[in-house]
Amino acid sequence: MPTDARPISQSAADDALLADALLGGGLPEEAEYHLWQAGQSYHLNDVAEKHLRDAQVVAPGHAAVLIGFYRFYFYKGRLTEALQIAKQCLAKAAVENRLPPHWRDVRASHADFGDYGNILPRFFLFTLKGYAYLQMRLGNLVEGRLAVQKLLELDPSDKIGARVLLEVVDRVGLDDD
């Protein structure tokens, strides 16, 4: 596990603040307004995307804003852009969990990935799952498979449901008889 010079209580307090931020805490009211407006104007691509960009200006790098962009791009079928956001979320999750910068270097001992109630490691796992899924959808099956295998290494009980992605990639090219 990475060493941290902060006292345990301070580390726990900081982790609680980060977890709160992931759930939308610490989001300025103006950014929250723009995220809400983006959701309300989802059917108007340009308007919704402008609200997302405005939220980003107010709260750059906030997880709630990144997740807003990710969902917008994903559900609009703009998978390449969703993948770029997933990469930003992976980088953010790595920093917030004090993990190695590249997901391939993360080990199960780096965080408590087995505790589903621990939101910071869960954020990393779900972000990696989204990354894997998008890689597969974009035809990058090798990269997607590697990401899924990493998920199963970090979460062997498969609480986040990564195994189904592995089954999908394993079936590519097989007849559906």
Image (tube, rainbow, N blue to C red):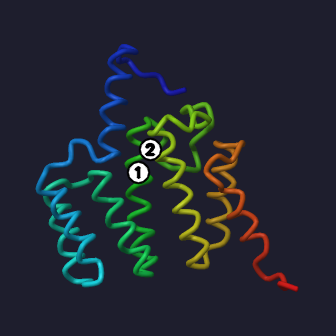
Q: Secondary structure at mark 1?
A: helix
Q: Is residue 29 above or below residue 168?
A: above
Instruction: Give 123 or 7, whichever is nearer the viewer.
Output: 123
The single residue placed furthest to the front in the displayed view is 40
Q: Which residue is mark 1?
A: 91
**In the rendered view, does 153 fall on the left or right side of 90?**
right
Instruction: Give 154 or 142, whichever is nearer the viewer.
Output: 154
Task: Please give the name of the residue rendered at 32% of the width and 59% of the height, measured from the top-left corner.
Answer: 66
Quadrant of the drawing holding the N terminus:
top right
**In the rendered view, does 40 fall on the left or right side of 163?**
left
Q: Say the numbered circle drawn on residue 94.
A: 2
Q: Which of the 4 image quadrants contains residue 34?
A: bottom left
Task: Please give the name of the residue rendered at 28% of the width and 58% of the height, measured from the top-left corner.
Answer: 65
Q: Say the numbered circle drawn on residue 1.
A: none
> What is the crowding at mark 1: few (fewer than 14 residues within 10 Å), some, or many (at least 20)?
some
On the image, the x and y values in percent for residue 159 come to 64, 46
> What is the crowding at mark 2: few (fewer than 14 residues within 10 Å), some, or many (at least 20)?
many
Asked if the residue at tag 1 contacts the one at tag 2, i.e. Cβ–Cβ closer than 8 Å, the answer is: yes
Q: Which of the 4 image quadrants contains residue 98?
A: top left
On the image, the x and y values in percent for residue 104 come to 59, 50
Task: Please give the name of the residue rendered at 32% of the width and 18% of the height, measured from the top-left corner.
Answer: 10
On the image, the x and y values in percent for residue 109 come to 61, 31
Q: Secondary structure at mark 2?
A: helix
The alpha-carbon separation of the residues under discs 2 and 1 comes to: 5 Å
On the image, the x and y values in percent for residue 76 come to 40, 80
Instruction: Give 128 or 39, whichever is nearer the viewer.
Output: 39
Q: Amino acid at mark 1?
A: Ala
Quadrant of the drawing holding the C terminus:
bottom right
Q: Is residue 147 above or below residue 140?
A: above
How many numbered discs? 2
Q: Amino acid at mark 2?
A: Ala
